Amino acid sequence: MNFKSLPQLLDFFKDEQAGIEYYENIRWNGNPVCPHCGSEKPYKTNRGYKCSNKDCHKKFTVRVGTIFENSKIPFRIWFAAIYLATTHKKGISSVQLSIDLGITQKTAWFVLHRIREMLKEKAPKMLGETNTVEVDETYIGGKEKNKHAHKRRSLDDKTKLNNGAAFVDKKVVIGIIERNGKVVLKHVPRATKENMVELIHKHVPKGSKIYTDEFAGYSNLGRNYTHDTVKHAFSIYVAGDVHTNTIENFWSVLKRGLYGVYHQVSEKHLERYLDEFASRFNTRDLSSQGRFDNFLSQSESVLSYKKLIG
Ligand SMILES: [Zn+2]
């Protein structure tokens, strides 16, 4: 089995049983585990499994304890949604997904948020062990009137944010990216030195090479890292190897997606959208199916509708 396109995926998952078998294999690899008590000896029943542990005896299907729990949407539609959400570089809106898959927009919205729950990084990533790392922060929301003056604007924004007054409506995101490697994103309340340094220390081993712009938040990085800065204030964006173009390019895809596809992203859900963009980027070298399997193997995570809207 090998699918490289949506029609091939839909052909392969032609009925619910095909989806169940595929997912059981990814989740349990032939050894079903009771999601209620962890027992590894369930009986097979007509509709799923029953736990053999006499203190448990609960029934379950492969969906229990995963993003598919309590959903009546067939696997075929779920898998098509995962495929679409993870192959569109800028993401897909719930309106578009509802049209593509013939489901209501409310369902599509919920499906997409559960997919984002699956895409969340489960273990902290280390960057910079093999390649140079670029760190930058960006501001989401507010008005983007003058995109050509983006660089200067962003420095102006930083100054103002440091002074604590204006741009309170903007949401701060820090990005750490390894050249030819992966990205880590984090939404922080403010672009303070403490927030910057804490995230960098968590994800970048000491001694790594880090490039940033001249924002004051990065001024002490030289203590633990080989740190160099680009002088954006003097309109210098590249000096030899020293630039932050990799993270700048990433910001541009992120913003085209957040503004162009999702229009408005509330502070409450921003982190989920960041997970989505980071995970797509971090799996860009995998095949469509490799990426699909990789994500499915991280789907043991339930997100209830109540929690999502609460
Ligand atoms: Zn059990």
Image (tube, helix red, strand yellow):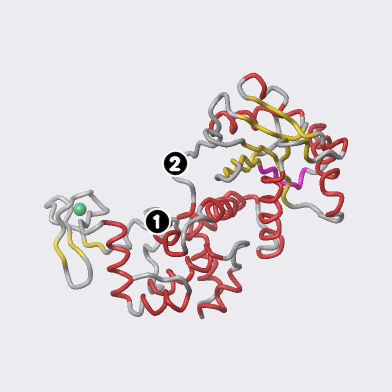
Residue drawn at x 49%, y 66% as measured from the top left: 111
Which is more toward the observer, 60 or 184? 184
Using residue 128 as the reference point, say whether residue 240 is left or right of it: right
Is 101 within the magenta?
Answer: no
Q: Is residue 168 above or below residue 60?
A: above
Q: Amino acid at mark 2?
A: Ala
The quarter of the image holding the N terminus is: bottom left
Q: Position of residue 262 (x, y in %)?
A: 66, 63
Residue drawn at x 77%, y 32% as measured from the top left: 215
Q: Amino acid at mark 1?
A: Ser
Which is more toward the observer, 14 or 168? 14
Query: Which residue appears farthest toward the front when viewing the image?
Result: 240
Is 169 within the magenta?
Answer: yes
Dot 2 alpha-carbon crowd within 10 angstroms: few under 14, some 14 to 19, many 20 or more: few
Using residue 182 as the reference point, say whether residue 148 is left or right of it: right
The quarter of the image holding the C terminus is: bottom right
Dot 1 alpha-carbon crowd within 10 angstroms: few under 14, some 14 to 19, many 20 or more: many
Magenta span: 168-173
Residue drawn at x 53%, y 35% as measured from the top left: 130
- Which labelled disc corresponds to residue 123? 2
Q: Position of residue 199 (x, y in %)?
A: 59, 33
Residue drawn at x 71%, y 29% as measured from the top left: 228
Using residue 18 as the reference point, say whether residue 294 is left or right of it: right
- Which labelled disc corresponds to residue 299? 1
Which is more toward the observer, 281 or 46? 281
Q: Position of residue 300 (x, y in %)?
A: 37, 54
Q: Position of residue 289 (x, y in %)?
A: 42, 64
